[in-house]
Image (cartoon, rainbow, N blue to C red):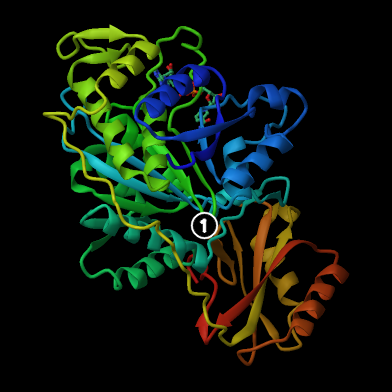
Amino acid sequence: MAASREITVAYGDGIGPEIMDATLRILDAAGANLKYDVIEIGEKVYRSGIPTGIPQEAWDSLRRTKVFLKAPITTPQGGGYKSLNVTMRKALSMYANVRPVKAYAPYVQTPYPHMDVVIIRENEEDLYAGIEYQLTADTVQANKLISRPGCERIVRYAFEYAKQYGRKKVTCMTKDNIMKQADGLFHQVFDEVAKEYPDIEADHKIIDIGSALVAARPDRLDVIVTLNLYGDIISDIAAEVAGSVGLGGSSNIGEDFAMFEAIHGSAPDISGQGIANPSGLLGGAIMMLVHLGMPEVAEKVRNAWLKTLEDGIHTADIYRPQVSTKKVSTSEFADAVIERMGQAPTRLTARPYAKGQEMRITVTRPAEVPKAIVGVDVYLDWHVDGRNAAVLGPQVEALAGDGLRLHFVENRGVKVYPGTAPLDFLNDLWRCRFVADNGSATATQVAALLGRFADAGLDVVQTATLYTFDGKRGYSLAQGE
Ligand code: NAD
């Protein structure tokens, strides 16, 4: 018999130990031939004074096994505890969050019995970099950082996933009508990569209508690829619409590491009662088996699980007298799945698992292009003289010179000088855009301008140099510019 594959396992908090126990019993019964290195992470570790919730031994195990099956954990409220999931995704560079969301009608109630969507969410970038500043008394800032390689990696992953799983369409969701640089880059990379997959339909939806489709016409969607925050939101909408928060599994995939879990949390309200549905974690474990190159075992487990659902053996969360035959506990549910090992469902259908090689995504680093300084945005904290742009404007304009001229002053994204301010409500953060007289400037000219701001006693809270890349504007225009 081949040596068993070692994986790292965390039993987690709340219902975690109950559903993990059920899941591992099922994997063992299917002959998965896995060895479990059990680590402690989560609530107890947080409370022992480790603010990440992850002790050194856990990192050591993960770096060795590279595959992690994780039960949900409880993040204690207050006390500045960091989300363990976000820490792990970033530390182990797990860039893709994959959440298949499928309807299991009529056994699980849903208005969309044909829903079968996979959401592929970028996991590392966007607002989740957690870079935030208070700039003035009125204003805080959160930085949304999007990189071309980051976009390319997740978009390629989505197309490769679609190819491997025989999916027909990939829909990209962004808000590039508003965020033309950040979301615009994601959309642009999507269009570029899509050309390499002519057999897969490529589609783009603005995230607002896209979310509405997830909620109201999910049967029109297949694979969705999107940025971190949007993906976070639409995954929960999708799970809710499928009627299956307790049924969904998810994976976090990186170049070297992968983590598999249920999409739900630690459910403290039902913890210790032995009634939780283990299907979400089992779904994560099935994805793990495919990742480990054991698609046959994955299929065997999934078939037995589908047959159990079909036979009406249901935990309390999905139990309905119209379709259920027996209400079972967590461990009785596991027993029922184990009894059906080797059987196949007759009504519920499932796609075959990809038997191809592991997906390796390679990203092309963008070529160096000529970059030129063409101006600078200077952000001021200014709240005197009734916040009157007609007072601030000339004061700032007087600082121009040495090849840089004032282009505009704006407040809350709208140009307020020169010209009359169209805003009724002004806050204390002002952006003053200076541009090069002759089309290009130097860092020395920019530094000298900032010196003149300091000499004038103006409070500069941030600057952003304006560049062109290969002659193309690398910054947004102001509203009304
Ligand atoms: P939750 O998902 O734990 O529970 C929401 C509701 O769904 C509850 O009524 C719960 O009883 C029910 N539920 C969840 N899973 C179920 C299952 N398997 N079977 C039957 N019913 C189930 O969400 P919450 O209450 O907002 O969060 C509880 C804790 O979980 C929090 O500390 C949160 O931080 C944590 N959490 C952890 C993860 C994770 O580790 N990946 C994810 C989400 C939330």
Residue 308 shown left or right of residue 267 in the figure: left
What residue is shown at x 76% (from left), y 54% (from top)? 384
What residue is shown at x 66% (from left), y 48% (from top)? 139
Number of residue marks: 1
| Residue 226 visible in image | yes
From the top left corner, tell me how far across and down residue 43 is, in percent.
65, 23
Residue 354 shown left or right of residue 254 in the figure: left
Q: Nearer the viewer, residue 334 or 413?
A: 334
Q: Is residue 90 above or below residue 1?
A: below
The amino acid type, in three-letter code, at marker 1 is Glu
**Which quarter of the figure has residue 55?**
top right
From the top left corner, tell me how far across and down residue 131 is, in percent.
66, 51
Disc 1, SS: loop
Q: Residue furthest right?
A: 455
**Which quarter of the figure has residue 84?**
top right
Q: Quadrant of the N terminus?
A: top left
**Which quarter of the figure has residue 314?**
top left
Q: Is residue 293 above or below residue 363?
A: above
Residue pointed to by mark 1: 255
